[in-house]
Image: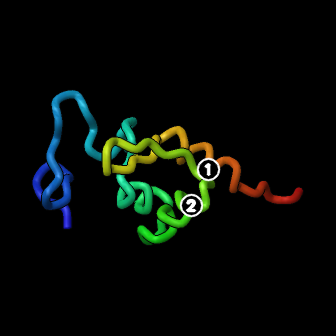
C-alpha cells in the first residue's frame, strides 16, 4: 500500500537516493532473492554450487550487484528471429 510520497510502509528516503532504484552495494541473500524474483533458497543454492560470486564479511555473506547482473546476463536466452 502506498503512503504519503509514494513509499511503501517502512521505506524511507535517504538524502540524494531514490528509494525505488536498486542500490549499488552488495546484496544480502534476501535482497538477491527479491532481485531475482525467487525465494532465498535459490541464491543460497547458487552460492553452495559456486555459480555466483560472493563476498564474505566475517559470518555475513553478500552478493555484489555486478555478480547478480552477470548471472542474469549469462542466464538470458535471446528470442529466435
Q: Residue at x 60, y 54 (%)?
A: 50
Quarter of the image that includes the N terminus = bottom left
In the rendered view, does 19 fall on the left or right side of 62?
left
The local secondary structure at tag 2 comes to: helix
Point out residue 36 in the picture as x, y percentages from the top left corner.
50, 60
Quarter of the image that includes the C terminus = bottom right
C-beta proximity under 8 Å, tags 2 and 1: yes
Point out residue 68 in the picture as x, y percentages from the top left corner.
53, 47
Q: Residues within 10 Å of mark 2 (few under 14, many from 20)?
A: some
Q: Residues within 10 Å of mark 1 (few under 14, many from 20)?
A: some
Q: Which residue is mark 2?
A: 46
Q: Residue at x 25, y 33 (%)?
A: 17
In the rendered view, does 12 fall on the left or right side of 23?
left
Residue farthest toward the top in the current orientation of the protein? 16
Q: Residue at x 86, y 59 (%)?
A: 80
Q: Which residue is mark 1?
A: 71
User: Is 11 or 33 nearer to us in this picture?
Assistant: 33
Which is in the foreground here, disc 2 or disc 1? 2
Q: Quadrant of residue 69?
A: top right
The local secondary structure at tag 1 comes to: helix
- The Cα atoms of the two marked residues, 2 and 1, are separated by 10 Å
User: Is 26 or 78 nearer to us in this picture?
Assistant: 26
Q: Earlier in the sequence, mark 2 or mark 1?
A: 2
Q: Which mark is residue 15?
A: none
Point out residue 18 in the picture as x, y percentages from the top left corner.
27, 38
Residue farthest toward the front in the current orientation of the protein? 58
Colour mapping used in the image: rainbow
Q: Quadrant of residue 35?
A: bottom left
Q: Residue at x 39, y 58 (%)?
A: 29
In the rendered view, does 12 fall on the left or right side of 20?
left
Amino acid at each position: 500500500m502506498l503512503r504519503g510520497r509514494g513509499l511503501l510502509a517502512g521505506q524511507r528516503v535517504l538524502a540524494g537516493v531514490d528509494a525505488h532504484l536498486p542500490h549499488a552495494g552488495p546484496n544480502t541473500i534476501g535482497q538477491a532473492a527479491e532481485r531475482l524474483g525467487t525465494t532465498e533458497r535459490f541464491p543460497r543454492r547458487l552460492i553452495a554450487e559456486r555459480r555466483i560470486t560472493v563476498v564474505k564479511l566475517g559470518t555475513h555473506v553478500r552478493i555484489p550487484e555486478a555478480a547478480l547482473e552477470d548471472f542474469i546476463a549469462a542466464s538470458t536466452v535471446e528470442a529466435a528471429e
